[in-house]
Amino acid sequence: SPAAVGFVSEDEYLEIQGITREQSGDYECSASNDVAAPVVRRVKVTVNYPPYISEAKGTGVPVGQKGTLQCEASAVPSAEFQWYKDDKRLAEGKKGVKVENRPFLSKLIFFNVSEHDYGNYTCVASNRLGHTNASITLFELPDNPIASRTSPASPGSASCPPCTV
Ligand SMILES: *[C@@H]1O[C@H](CO)[C@@H](O)[C@H](O)[C@H]1NC(C)=O
Ligand SMILES: *[C@@H]1O[C@H](CO)[C@@H](O)[C@H](O)[C@H]1NC(C)=O
Ligand SMILES: *[C@@H]1O[C@H](CO)[C@@H](O)[C@H](O)[C@H]1NC(C)=O
């Protein structure tokens, strides 16, 4: 809103120089004279900007478990995502791997991690204003010793936090 960002113009025009993405939003224009009550109109201002990746975290997974790499990017228009492993683009429909894209988030899901899945992945986020990338590592964790050693004396240990991916 104009009040929140401190823009007030008494003119016919409101000129915002060097606009930033925080200044997106609804602006109000009010016109009045001595004869009638003011007329107010809202104008929606959209600020486009190239993607920036706000979160890209590596994850450790034991062989044979499900692993998910996540890449979060902010952009307007919203980003499109691509994944690479060691600079090779991941083929669509690769067996056992799925990419889930949402406007601000891409997930690379391995349903059953095998030795050759470990390594460095690159998430590329792009829109028509630009692109950026981040490197994410899928690394090997030893099979969870607590989960496989669940004893009858401690039933609660079956839900150990490291099991969640
Ligand atoms: C994961 O892959 C291994 C090796 O291909 C296989 O032996 C195992 O049964 C698979 N596990 C699941 C849950 O599909
Ligand atoms: C992954 O990237 C890290 C940091 O750039 C590097 O040290 C490591 O050797 C890479 N691993 C592989 C398997 O390429
Ligand atoms: C990631 O960005 C760097 C630096 O801009 C660039 O050199 C590299 O080629 C990019 N990698 C991919 C896979 O797009």
Image (cartoon, rainbow, N blue to C red):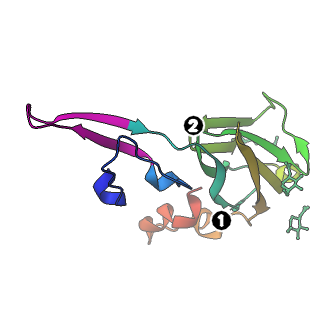
Residue placed at 52% from the left, 66% from the top?
A: 161
Cβ atoms at labels 2 and 1 below 8 Å apart = no
The answer to whether residue 151 is left or right of residue 99 is left
Q: Is residue 7 magenta?
A: no
Residue placed at 17% from the left, 37% from the top?
A: 32
Marks 2/1: CA–CA distance = 31 Å
79 or 58, nearer to the observer: 79
Query: As drawn, which residue projects farthest toward the top?
Result: 93
Label 2 crowd bin: few (<14), some (14–19), many (20+), radius 10 Å: few
Where residue 86 appears, x then y in whole percent? 91, 52
The residue where tag 1 is placed is: 144
| Residues drawn in magenta | 24-43
Residue placed at 78% from the left, 27% from the top?
A: 93
141 or 132, nearer to the observer: 132
Earlier-in-chain disc, 2 versus 1: 2
- Can the viewer see residue 100 in this picture? yes
Where residue 122 appears, x then y in whole percent? 80, 52
Magenta region's main secondary structure?
strand
The answer to whether residue 161 is left or right of residue 83 is left
At numbered mark 1, what does the secondary structure look like: helix, strand or loop?
Answer: loop
The residue where tag 2 is placed is: 102
The answer to whether residue 32 is left or right of residue 73 is left
- Can the viewer see residue 112 in this picture? no
What amino acid does circle 1 point to?
Asn
Quadrant location of residue 165? bottom right
